[in-house]
Structures are given as structure tokens and as C-alpha cells.
């Protein structure tokens, strides 16, 4: 049964994501330290990450729409992963601020190019009743890479402490494997036309033609995103209690391992009980985790909370995209995903800025409590939405 559901294309895309995440997450824990070591101030790091995230956000919508209009997926997937892989060693080549900005933005542009087309390709390979399984499997493979990456970084830094530059070069190796795997993908989509012109912001028009259920879902998800700051604040909460860098990275690896183990099983359950039900439950778990995160003070408590956070992630990240693809026409799948992920990137940037301000002015406990309350509100509104507009379509 699973062999029929997990097609060759789904497996290939999942392994591409796995190797790409090994490369990306190998650098995630050391990126701020590396930037500080080459002279970047905290302010400059913030500007860099903000610009990179804005680039990813705007490009996700444009290239998702472009993919639908062109009727192709593979070129966007291939070029997206290629740019991200090449950007890794570029960051170690020169240390000039403008060059670092270029390399980091190139990485995020790659993510923007591939996201809509990749998720649409996964959707095209399955049926509505199996979307939870497919997107859950993809997230599981992606997150296995997110666990292997920082573990590899820990091993490397144990033998070569402080030698960050070579880590950026090493990270190109799994990225190269990902690129090579994209050449095994075969194009199947043929519903577009190369002659159609795509304006940079033309994907915004999709909101007018989108269905009511899509609008309610995306509005609820974006409200959630407005309170969902960067995971860096969770790691900062660990450091704030005086735990070591090794403990902090260890907790992050633990989170990714639990997430990887749960994503596929939760996807199977979601197909049975409903994607919306699973999504809402996951958001309530998030609210619970954030409500207690500011009060944790030892490694055991942090492990429990990060384990619960993995349950939230496995119940929402792939599931939300599965829901979106079920609530959009096949010819508009990449545009629908691109529209949502575009605004989600921008809202995440706003959420992180707001969280930073709250942490600075009020402290970590109020910041986490406010975020938890906001997400609880978003989850409640999504839970009530079926009474407002009727039930979502089957498997949604």
C-alpha cells in the first residue's frame, strides 16, 4: 500500500530535502557565531536575516505563480536547490559584508524558487485522502536531515573548535548530493503555458479567486504566524537558564529527532481523523509549550517541552500544506502555497521582531505567555471555522 502512495517522485523529493537540510542545519547553530567572528554586529546580523527572509517571502509567491503559469515544476525545484547549495561555500570565500549579504540572500532566494513548485509536485503525486501521509513523510525526511546536520557540526567543532569557515565548505557536499538527485526527477505537469507573462506581485490576485475555505484557513494560519517567532528564541531560553552550548544544540537535535519520528505517523492519523482537526490540535500544543517555556529551568524540563514542540511541528507544518493543496485547484496549487508561504515569511519576520522587543522590554516569561495566548486564539478561531462555513472537504 505504501509503495503505491510513496511514489518515486515523492521519495526523490524527500531525499533531496533530507540532504539539503543536512547542509543547512550543519550551519544553523554556528551562523551567528561565525558572523560575529568576521565582524558582524548584532544589528547587522538582524538586518541580514531580515533581508534574507523578505527575499524568501516575496520570491515564494512569485515563483509559485510562475510554476503554475509555466506548467512546470522540475526546473524550479532544481534551480532552487542549486542556488541554496552554492551559497554555502560562498559565505566562506570572502568576509566582506556585501558579499555575505549576497550569499545569504542567494540561499533564501533558492528556497523561494523551489517551495511552491516542490510542494505542488508532492500534491500532484497523490490524492486528497493521502495528503497527510505524503506531506508527513516529506517533513519526516526533511527533519532527519535537520537532526544529522547539527550533529555533524558538533562532531566537527569538537575536533576543530573555532574553525567555522571549513564547515561552510563541507556543507556543500550534502548540498551537491541533493542537486544530483534533482536530475532524476521527471516532469509531469503540463497544464500551463510558457507564453503567459507573470508579474512579480501578480500572485496577490489569487486571493480574489480563492475559495472561502482557503481564505479562512490562510487567515487563521497567518494569525498564528504573527505569534510564532523564530525557534532561536526557544534556544535562547535554554541559554538564558545557564545551560551550555552543547546542551542547547543537544536539545535542538532531540527536537528534530522526535519531529522526524512523529511526522509520518501523525500524517497517517491526520488522513483518518481529518487534517483540520490535527492542525488545530497541534496549534493548541504550541500554545501549551510557549505558556510553560518561560518557566523551565533545567534540562529535563526543556527536553519535555521540546518533545511537545516536536508534536506541534509534526501536526502542523506538513499538514497545513496538505490542507492548502486540498482547498485549491490543481492548476493553482503552487500559487496557493506560494501566496501563503510568502506572507508567512513576512509575518514570521514581524513576529520575531515583536518577540525580540517583548523579551527586551518585559523579559522572556511575558514574551512566551503572550505568544502562547495569541496562538491559542488562532487555534480557537480555526476550530470554530467549520461552524461558520460548514465542514472542510473530505480529508481536510
Image (cartoon, rainbow, N blue to C red):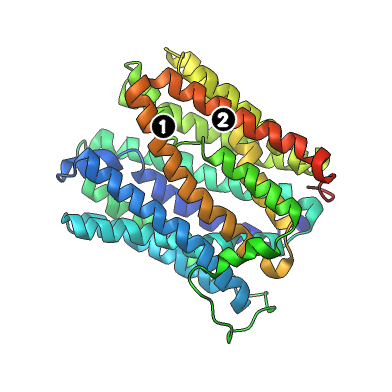
Query: How many discs appear?
Result: 2
The answer to whether residue 134 is seen in the rendering is no
The picture quadrant where one finds residue 42 is top left
- Please determine whether, in this image, residue 245 is positioned above or below residue 223: above
Decide which of 81, 376 is in the foreground and name it. 376
Q: Position of residue 288 (x, y in %)?
A: 59, 22
Q: Residue visible at 59% across and 78% down?
A: 70
How far apart are the two marked residues, 1 and 2, measured between alpha carbons? 12 Å
- Please determine whether, in this image, residue 66 is positioned above or below residue 196: above
Q: Where is residue 96 in the image (x, y as percent from the top left)?
A: 15, 56
- On the image, numbered disc 1 is attached to which residue? 355
Which of the labelled discs sits on residue 252, or is there none? none
Q: Residue visible at 17% across and 41% down?
A: 37
The answer to whether residue 358 is seen in the rendering is yes
Left or right of residue 7: residue 106: left
The picture quadrant where one finds residue 157 is top left
Q: Residue visible at 52% across and 17% down?
A: 292
- On the image, numbered disc 2 is attached to which residue? 374
Q: Mark 2 or mark 1, which is nearer the start of the sequence?
A: 1
- Please determine whether, in this image, residue 109 is positioned above or below residue 159: below
Decide which of 32, 215 is in the foreground and name it. 215
Q: Where is residue 179 in the image (x, y as percent from the top left)?
A: 46, 65
Q: Residue visible at 16% across and 46% down?
A: 38
Amino acid at each position: 500500500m505504501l509503495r503505491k502512495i510513496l511514489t518515486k517522485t515523492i521519495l526523490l523529493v524527500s531525499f533531496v530535502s533530507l540532504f539539503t537540510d543536512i547542509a543547512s542545519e550543519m550551519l544553523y547553530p554556528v551562523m551567528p557565531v561565525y558572523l560575529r567572528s568576521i565582524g558582524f554586529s548584532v544589528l547587522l546580523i538582524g538586518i541580514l536575516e531580515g533581508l534574507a527572509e523578505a527575499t524568501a517571502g516575496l520570491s515564494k509567491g512569485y515563483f509559485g505563480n510562475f510554476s503554475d503559469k509555466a506548467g512546470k515544476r522540475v526546473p524550479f525545484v532544481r534551480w532552487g536547490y542549486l542556488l541554496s547549495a552554492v551559497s554555502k561555500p560562498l559565505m566562506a570565500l570572502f568576509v566582506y559584508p556585501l558579499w555575505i549579504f549576497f550569499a545569504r540572500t542567494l540561499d533564501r532566494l533558492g528556497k523561494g524558487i523551489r517551495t511552491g513548485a516542490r510542494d505542488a509536485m508532492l500534491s500532484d503525486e497523490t490524492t486528497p485522502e493521502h495528503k497527510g501521509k505524503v506531506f508527513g513523510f516529506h517533513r519526516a525526511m526533511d527533519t532527519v536531515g535537520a537532526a544529522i546536520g547539527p550533529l555533524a557540526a558538533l562532531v566537527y567543532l569538537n575536533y576543530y573548535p573555532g574553525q567555522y569557515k571549513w564547515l561552510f565548505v563541507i556543507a556543500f557536499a550534502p548540498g551537491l548530493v541533493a542537486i544530483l538527485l534533482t536530475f532524476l526527477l521527471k516532469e509531469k505537469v503540463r497544464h500551463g503555458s510558457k507564453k503567459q507573462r507573470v508579474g512579480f506581485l501578480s500572485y496577490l490576485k489569487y486571493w480574489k479567486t480563492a475559495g472561502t475555505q482557503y481564505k479562512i484557513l490562510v487567515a487563521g494560519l497567518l494569525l498564528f504566524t504573527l505569534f510564532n517567532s523564530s525557534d532561536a528564541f526557544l534556544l535562547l531560553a535554554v541559554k538564558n537558564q545557564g545551560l551550555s552550548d552543547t546542551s542547547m544544540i543537544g536539545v535542538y537535535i532531540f527536537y528534530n529527532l522526535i519531529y522526524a519520528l512523529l511526522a509520518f505517523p501523525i500524517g497517517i492519523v491526520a488522513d483518518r481523523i481529518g487534517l483540520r482537526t490535527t492542525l488545530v490540535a497541534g496549534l493548541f500544543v504550541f500554545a501549551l509549550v510557549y505558556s510553560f517555556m518561560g518557566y523551565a529551568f533545567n534540562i529535563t524540563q526543556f527536553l519535555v517541552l521540546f518533545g511537545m514542540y516536536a508534536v506541534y511541528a509534526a501536526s502542523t507544518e506538513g499538514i497545513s500544506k496538505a490542507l492548502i493543496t486540498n482547498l485549491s485547484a490543481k492548476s493553482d496549487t503552487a500559487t496557493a502555497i506560494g501566496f501563503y508561504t510568502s506572507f508567512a515569511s513576512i509575518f514570521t519576520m514581524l513576529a520575531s521582531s515583536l518577540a525580540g522587543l517583548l523579551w527586551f522590554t518585559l523579559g522572556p516569561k511575558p514574551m512566551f505567555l503572550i505568544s502562547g495566548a495569541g496562538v491559542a486564539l488562532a487555534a480557537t478561531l480555526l476550530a470554530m471555522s467549520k461552524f461558520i462555513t460548514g465542514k472542510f472537504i473530505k480529508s481536510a
